[in-house]
Structures are given as structure tokens and as C-alpha cells.
Image (spheres, rainbow, N blue to C red):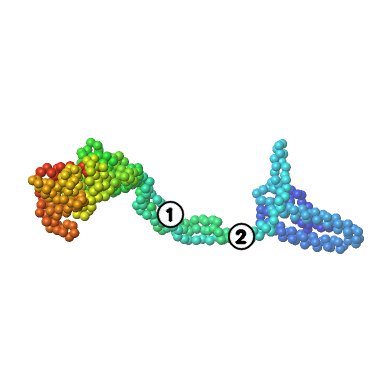
Amino acid sequence: MLNAKDSYPHENKNLSDVFKELQEIRNNPNAQQAYAEQMKHAKKSKAKKNFNLFASIPNSQNRNKRKTTDLKLSHIITGCSILIVSMALFFPKDMPFKESYAKVDTLDNQSEYELNRHSLNMQSIISENTDMDRVKEQAVEEREVEFETTYHNTPTLPKGEEVILQEGLLGKDKVTAVKTYENGNLVEEIILAKEKLEEPTPKIINLGTSEFLAKHKVHIGDILYFVNDAKLKESSDTTSSDIAEIKKSIDVKLLELPSEEWCKVSFDGIEGYIKTSNLTSSYTTPNIVEKNRIQRILLKINISMELNKVSGLTLNDYKKIFTNLPNDTHKIFQDNYQVFYNMEKKYNLNGIFLASMAIHESGWGTSQIAQDKKNLFGYGSYDSTPYESSFEFANYAEGIETVAKSLVKYYLNPSGTKIYDGEIAAGWYYNGPTVAGVNTRYASDPNWHTKVFNYMEFLYHRL
């Protein structure tokens, strides 16, 4: 028979001792190796002794009986050993044996354990872990450092508008890191050290806050327009002294915006303060530009204005001025508004002045000379024989052009001035390019210039 010392390591031991021994083997790698060697040795030893034992049995019946008994016991012990070792290897180390079964709480707080029947495919697990390429490396590299963006509230910019004051520049760091790759993909990075090489330069942006500028879509230095007549002040205070009076629709240049209520502007070189509520823009009031053009023309209307210059009016302006004049009963001026415009462009003189002369001399085209001779100016007549001495023209346009040429050559320009078609002004009756200057040698009535200028103002203001 086999001795106990020559049997498997777990034979002749109760189940509790076997569990305890397996737990110690599992937690100790050296014990696991020793246990494996012991098992190997026990198998060889037992096989040898069983062979000798069977050889010494004389009776085949007894031999078969003993062999059967020994084989059954051996099989049972071997099977249990394999089962126990497998359970010890596959259960987690930190889980007691009894916890390797699924625990189900019942209503009476009794515990039942259900065997986990989901088998593990060891070949698949080993294959998957064998195929995974996991690599760690240490790298030293330069990396860019993002810059910060700083915003400064700016009341001299339209609300929400951004102006870059300083561009941002990236910084640079020297970084030492351990990188982990799985199948070529970076899965983990651990920074070991970081050294600053270049500091980043922050980006600085001015952020507009002015609702006034945003409303009118303008900036400092742009043009604004007066919405009504108002006075420029010496400072941003209603009690400060007046500097100048500005007419409605006149344009000014925006210089400063000390507050949302007041701004500093420039009007033809005169600087002063005005409330922002008195101003508008071409964006807010699109038709203000055209009104400003007319207003600028009207500002130049005065009795001392120079008449050897164009009026600045368009053909549409002339049409507007001369259409439906209440005193133009024969529609003479309405029908010839383009003639007056053309004379202005051709001979470089003020066409409104030319028309005002015709209105005054012909009584709105009602005089006999105007009716019979198409002569709106009484051109060529003398005081003693006005009708007889006056020139006769084929039409009103011919008479208007004759007078225009005479004014430019003899009354409005000094001698030697280059005028139309290469001609040179004679300047025989020149006393200045004003209405009063023409009055000196053209009419015997000393108030002639005042009467003519009144018609000029009347026509201009029809705009």
C-alpha cells in the first residue's frame, strides 16, 4: 500500500485544511512553484508504487479487486484536486471562496448561492492580450503655449465693435513627459517636468461701449448733421458761452465724445460742444445728405457773394426753382430754366443772378419789351427811349445768352481774365464781382442791386 507521505499533497487532509493551504499557495508565488513541483513528484512516485504493488499480487482476482478500489479512490482524489486548484486560480484574490457564488437576498434575509455558469474562454483572453501592442516612451519636446485675450472697454467706439490694439503671440515650453501608446494610439501622458522658454504675449482688444456711435453707425472723425438749429457751446455745459449758431441739416465733424450726452464737433474750423441729441447721421437719416447740400448752398447766399462763380445747383434744382412760380404768368422762366442753367455752366457765372436780373427788368416777363422783342433785360435801351433803343431777339434764349456774355466780359471780371472760348475779359465796367459792383455801371437806380438780390434770395429758398 501507499504511504501517506508518498501520496498527493492534499490526500489524508480534511477539506478545511485543503482550502487553507490553497489560499496560502495562491497568495505566495514561491509556494505556488513548490506546490507544482510537489504535485509532479507525487504523481511519479505513486505511479511507480502502484506498478510494484500490482506486480506482487499473486491472485488475479484480488489484484483486480484491489486495483479497482485504488483506481476509484485515486480518480476521486485527482478530480477534486483539479477542481480545487482551478477554483483557486480563477477566483479573485480578495474574494473569499464562498463569495464566488452569486448572492441573492430572499424576503426572510436567507442567502442563496447560484453557481456562475458563464464559462471563460481562456484562449480568447490570452490571444487578445497577446495581440495588444502597448509601448511607453519618454519624450522631451517644445510645445506652444496659448496667449490670453484681454478686452478694454472703450467709450469712443460703437458698442460691440472690436479694435485689436495688440496681436497675441504664442509662448513656448520645454516639456518632459512619459507617453503610453496602445496599438499606435496615445492613451496616456504623464508630465514629468515643464520649463518656460518664451512667455506668451496677450492679445489686447478695445471693445466699444458707445450706444450713440452704434446707433448712428459713425466713428470719431466722421460727419454728423444737425437735426435743428442749435448753438455750439464753449464747453459741455448748457450754461457755457455760445460760440456759433448752426443751421438745420448743416454738417459737422465729430472730434470727441466725452460722454453719451455731449460731443465736440468742428464747423468750418470752429470747434465747440453740442448735445448728441441734436445730431444725426446719413445712416439714421438718409435724406439728410441732400438737405445738407442745399443748406450749404443757402449759407453762401449774401449780398456780397461773388457772381463770377457757378451756383452749385443741379439741373433738377433749376427745374424745382422755376417750376410753378406764382408770378410767372406767361411761363417764360419755367420754359427757359435750362437756358439759365446752361449759361451758368458755359460762361462761369451765377445763373440765379442772371434770372433775377431778367425778373426785375421785365416784371416777370410782362413788360412790352419782353413780350414784343423777347428781351427780358431791356438790353441796349436808354432812359429817354427805352423801347425804341432796346435790342430785339429771335427768342428768349438768344437774349439771355447775349446778356450773359456781356456781363462776363465787361462787368464781372477784371481786365485780362481768361473767360469763355479763349476770350479775355475787357473789364470796362468792372467794380467787383458782386451785385453792388454791377449796379455801379449797369443801372442808374442806386437800389438796383438790393432789388435784384431780393429776387435771388426768393429763388434760392424755393429749394
Number of numbered discs on residues: 2
Within 10 Å of the Cα at label 1, are there few (<14), some (14-19), or many (20+) other Cα atoms?
Answer: some
Whichever of labels 1 and 2 marks the residue nearer the N terminus, that label is 2
Marks 1/2: CA–CA distance: 36 Å
Residue located at (67% from left, 58% from top): 124
Nearer-the-camera pick, 58 or 246? 246
Amino acid type, callout 2 = Met
- Residue 347, given in percent of the width and then of the height, sits at 19, 54
109 left or right of 381 in image = right
- Residue 109, given in percent of the width and then of the height, sits at 70, 38
160 left or right of 315 in image = right
Q: Are marks 1 and 2 in contact (CB under 8 Å)?
A: no
Q: Which residue is mark 1?
A: 146
Nearer-the-camera pick, 88 or 294? 294
| Discs 1/2, front | 1
Question: What number is the disc on residue 257?
Answer: none
The image quadrant where one finds the N terminus is bottom right
Residue located at (84% from left, 63% from top): 52
Question: For residue 291, which quarter of the picture?
Answer: top left
Q: Which residue is mark 2?
A: 132
- Residue 227, given in percent of the width and then of the height, sits at 28, 41
Residue located at (56% from left, 61% from top): 184
- Residue 29, given in percent of the width and then of the height, sits at 66, 56
Question: For residue 136, which quarter of the picture?
Answer: bottom right
Residue located at (27% from left, 39% from top): 228
